[in-house]
Image (spheres, helix red, strand yellow):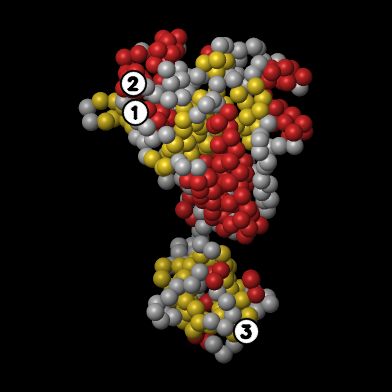
Amino acid sequence: MTVKDQKTYSRDVTPGTDVRVAGWVAKIRDLGNIKFFLLRDREGMVQVTAKKGADAMLDAILALGREDYVTVSGKAVASRQAPRGVEIVPSAIEVVAKAASPLPIDFGDKIETNLDKRLDWRVLDLRNPRNLAIFKVQDRLIEGMQAALRERGFMQVFTPALMGVASESGADVFPVFYYNREVYLRQDPQLHRQLLIAAGFDRLYDLGPSWRAEPSHTSRHLCEHRGLAPEMTLTDETDTMRLEEAVVIAALQNVQAHCGPELETLGVTVEVPEAPFPVLTFPKVYDILESLGKTVAHGEDVDREGEKLLGDWVKKKHKSDFFFMNKFPFKKKPFYVMRDGEWARSVDLIYRGLELSSGGQREHRHDRIMQQIKEKKMDPKTLEWFTEPFRYGVPPHGGFCIGIERLTMQVLGIENVREAALFPRTPDRCLP
């Protein structure tokens, strides 16, 4: 392969080599006898410099505009003034695609464009190295979690996104016209994961989108979100906690190992927690909140303020950003959870005061499932597709679903979860 045919990423440009790079013009500087620009690609930036005597290259740089897409061929040389100590002395500069001017949004070092406008122009917004860094970290988080699951014998599966009936609250689903009838976008892939346990898959996980039609405009909600969702046979809900700890720790270790430049760009330090994570159990949770000045009625769930208070309490007492809440009030949980008297073997993982996942042990006994459907005042007929297999011997099982965008948001200290989604979907936004 010749130099002309070969493309080099900016990070791989080293002094003393002939290179051909391609990317966008990020900055242009005219210093009289010296003219240079920064070329940006997926892996960073590299400086391209022309000096007096190379008139054709000087003119070519002067003709460039911000965000033009160009290819550059030339010699890489050492330079103390250039980023990473290397620059390219060009022999050829080709404008492959000219960018219109002015740009509709700002995505330089100091971003002044508001988030809504940036999301209108999301493709340009994602060219910002800080945004690219967010999704490189997200990629490594997912990679680490998948590796941890694979090491423990889990196989990846793909469950349906379309549901013939609503799996949980009918008020929070998106209806979809499906041939001659109405179906729904799934709220969670969990019921089909349970059916795969009934089918004998034993240890599996799904990685994909779910939808909730909540009319929420908060900085932590999306109408479409992605989740990593394992399901497995188990002894009780504590097995799900041990797995989730391992998965989260592996994710953060993977980011530490592979995302040094991205974390530096974002100004973030990632700390890997120690297992086991603290566990707060109902009804003891009510006593802790009472001591913190917040009263929650017995049998009620904990709201956002309560999660933050508990997060601060755990951080102070246990020096941990993570903790589990277990044994939620059964009346607040779906029909499929394992009941334990007044409580449910239902587990949430809280990270820096925000719910990151929900899961726990499921009910595997057919008669109990039917009883709980009746208690929840649901129509057993509409759930037969799910409940009938449980008449034929299903082992105890459980799992959880970690929200990918929320995990990314909390790891990186991002203020709005929409910045952790490539193309966020909210009550007001379904484009681009």
Mark 2 falls on what kind of element?
helix
Does 288 appear above or below 148? above
Tell me if label 3 and label 1 are in contact, CB under 8 Å.
no
Does 97 appear above or below 31? above
Q: Quadrant of residue 276?
A: top right
Crowd band around label 1 with a 10 angstrom C-alpha radius: few (<14), some (14–19), many (20+): some
Disc on the earlier residue, 3 or 1 = 3
The residue shown at (41%, 71%) is: 96
The residue that label 1 is drawn on is 163
Quick check: can you spot residue 226?
no
| CA–CA distance in space, label 1 to label 2 | 23 Å
The residue that label 3 is drawn on is 33
Residue kind at label 3, given as amino acid type: Asn
Residue kind at label 1, given as amino acid type: Met
- Closer to us: 199 or 111: 199
Image coords of residue 72 (percent x, y): 48, 76
Quick check: can you spot residue 78?
yes
Query: From the viewer's perspective, is the residue at label 1 or at label 2 nearer?
Result: 2
The residue shown at (56%, 41%) is: 247
Q: Quadrant of residue 417?
A: top right
The residue that label 2 is drawn on is 392
Answer left or right for 282 relative to 174.
Answer: right
